[in-house]
């Protein structure tokens, strides 16, 4: 069995209809912790499925989804972050989530 990693899935979706569809997909993979933030424990296969489902929903020119890898339960992996849609741009200010 594949090891699960904990992810924060955070999104900024420009259209209300796509926003509802993205939320519905995320609800099937994890728990909502804020309006546009979910925590999910995912295997590699589950993560690939989640990304594929979301990829089919979003507009890559206006929407953004961030996948923040919080690491495995045994903390053997470092913190990483990926995105779909608009690229992540590091801000020069502190962002509080």
Image (cartoon, grey):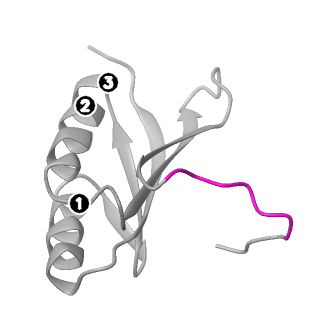
| Residue occupying the far top of the picture | 1
| Magenta segment includes 91 | yes
**Around disc 3, counting alpha carbons within 10 Å, would you say few (fewer than 14), some (14 to 19), or many (20 or more)?**
few
Q: How many marks?
A: 3
| Magenta segment includes 51 | no
**In this figure, which residue is indicated by the disc labeled 3?**
44
- Residue drawn at x 17%, y 78% is 20
Where the N terminus falls, by quadrant?
top left
Left or right position of 85 against 30: right
| Residue occupying the far front of the picture | 61
- Residue 32 point in image, percent of width and height: 36, 71
Looking at the image, is 22 positioned above or below residue 88? Answer: below
- Residue drawn at x 33%, y 78% is 14
Say what secondary structure mark 3 lies in: helix
- Residue 72 point in image, percent of width and height: 53, 29
Q: Main secondary structure of the magenta part?
A: loop
Viewer-side residue, 50 vs 63: 63
Q: CA distance from mark 2 to mark 1?
A: 16 Å
Q: CA distance from mark 3 to mark 2?
A: 6 Å
**In this figure, which residue is indicated by the disc labeled 1?**
58
When asked about the image quadrant of residue 77, the answer is: top right
Say what secondary structure mark 1 lies in: loop
When asked about the image quadrant of residue 96, the answer is: bottom right
Left or right position of 66 against 32: right
**Around disc 2, counting alpha carbons within 10 Å, would you say few (fewer than 14), some (14 to 19), or many (20 or more)?**
few
**In this figure, which residue is indicated by the disc labeled 2?**
48
User: What are the residue bounds of the magenta stretch?
Assistant: 87-93
Q: Earlier in the sequence, mark 2 or mark 1?
A: 2
Q: CA distance from mark 3 to mark 1?
A: 21 Å
């Amino acid at each position: 069995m594949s090891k699960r990693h904990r992810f924060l899935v955070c999104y900024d979706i420009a259209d209300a209809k796509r926003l509802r569809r993205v939320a519905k997909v995320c609800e099937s993979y994890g728990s909502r912790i804020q309006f546009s933030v979910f925590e999910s424990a995912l295997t590699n296969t589950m993560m690939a499925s989640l990304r594929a489902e979301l990829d089919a929903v979003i507009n890559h020119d206006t929407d953004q989804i961030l996948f923040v890898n919080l690491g495995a339960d045994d903390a053997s992996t470092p913190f990483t972050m990926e995105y779909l849609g608009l690229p992540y741009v590091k801000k020069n200010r502190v962002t509080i989530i």
